[in-house]
Image: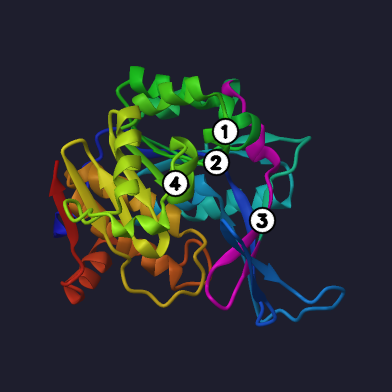
Amino acid sequence: MGLLNNIQHDKKYDFVTIGSATLDIFVETPEARIVSVSAPASKNEFMSFPYGSKVDIENFAFEIGGGALNTAMNFKNLGFETATIVKLGADPMGKAIKSKLKNADICDDYIVSVDDEKSGLSVILTSFQGDRTVLAHRGTNATLKINEINFDAISNSNWLYLAPLNGDSTKCLDKIAQFAEDNNVNLSINLGTSSIKSSRENLLNVLKTAEILIMNSEEAKMLTGMSVRPDSTKESFSAYDIHPDIVKMLNTIKAMTGGIAVITDGKQGVYAFDGSKYYQCGEFPAKPVSTLGAGDAFASTFTAVYSQTSDIVRALKYASVNAASVVENFGAQKGFLKFDEIEQKLQLNKDFQVKEVQV
């Protein structure tokens, strides 16, 4: 497994990431309560605090975050030459983000800076269960324009990682993806809800160009218009050992992309389909502290491993371990592991396996 520590750098960058950049304020308090509200066809949970009261904070932290920065930090930690393209305001948040990137030796030459807008900011409320509610100010993350993107950075990279874009920034998706396709740059996309809600025709053009397409189960439901029926356990789906509705989703998503379709499903684990095999991987054991950033850790680690090995099974294992490590830490980037550390954890958990089913 140690082969992953010998990375070949063919271009100036191994990865360029594009997406959101935020200053994250993590807040942890024992006063948070989880309230469940049920209806005949649904059940929702809400994080609540006593109305009109002052709530004591047990722990807090300031970190940089957002899809583009979380993944860039992870790629760099894994040993890859990395650059990022994000948009920031000329404010304390923007300055803090630039400083952190420079300290991490991530190329920040392509950051877009503007004087008349505010950078992105998030307040993350963490519950005793380890899950979180995010109060997000999109700011400059929602205003990236196509003429602000340095396309030379993309053409000088082996891979382009597209994190979820927000607001008007989603209008850049198709041109970015087409440029990567025309310049032989591999594309990994982590879809977000804003991108799915954008022009479906443009989105389908984008998805066709991706080598890897990753989304969570809620995004998969939104993209396909399908749902996972809780009563379908009565059906026989032993042929795949995967929920029949998940199989249908994977098939539908794979028809949209030339690459690998991956669906993450929280505690249920993750599923993938490459057109020839279905893959199912459970959740790697972890003691949850905060789930924020786990999706970014998974998607970027999967992409990193696959870029070096073309091995889906190994990519699923490594990504699951790194995501579990992030979950065990307070912050979206503190749990990042290096390849040798991931390998050590897998050696200690040899029962952790990926199921494969040939179509």
Q: Is residue 69 left or right of residue 63?
A: left
Which residue, given by chain and number where applicable, does mark 2 sit on?
Answer: 193
Q: Are marks 1 and 4 in contact (CB under 8 Å)?
A: no
Which residue, given by chain and number where applicable, does mark 3 sit on?
Answer: 122
Question: Which residue: 35% across, 35% down?
Answer: 253
| 291 in relation to 171, above or below | below
Within-10-Å neighbours for mark 2: few <14, some 14–19, many 20+: some
Which residue, given by chain and number where applicable, does mark 4 sit on?
Answer: 227
Residue 351 forms part of the magenta stretch = no
Under mark 2, the amino acid is: Thr
Under mark 3, the amino acid is: Ser
Closer to the eye: label 3 or 4: 4
Q: Is residue 90 left or right of residue 319?
A: right
Under mark 4, the amino acid is: Ser
| 39 in relation to 92, above or below | below
Q: Are marks 2 and 1 in contact (CB under 8 Å)?
A: yes
Image quadrant assignment for residue 51:
bottom right
Compute the Cα span from label 3 to label 4: 30 Å
Region in magenta: 124-146
Quadrant containing the N terminus is: bottom left
Which residue, given by chain and number where applicable, does mark 1 sit on?
Answer: 197
Residue 131 forms part of the magenta stretch = yes
Q: Are marks 4 and 2 in contact (CB under 8 Å)?
A: no
Q: Secondary structure at mark 4?
A: loop
Which badge, 1 or 4, comes first in the chain's sequence?
1
Which badge, 1 or 3, comes first in the chain's sequence?
3
Q: Is residue 117 visible?
A: yes
Which badge, 4 or 2, comes first in the chain's sequence?
2
Compute the Cα span from label 1 to label 3: 22 Å
Question: Which residue: 52% across, 50% down?
Answer: 102
Under mark 1, the amino acid is: Lys
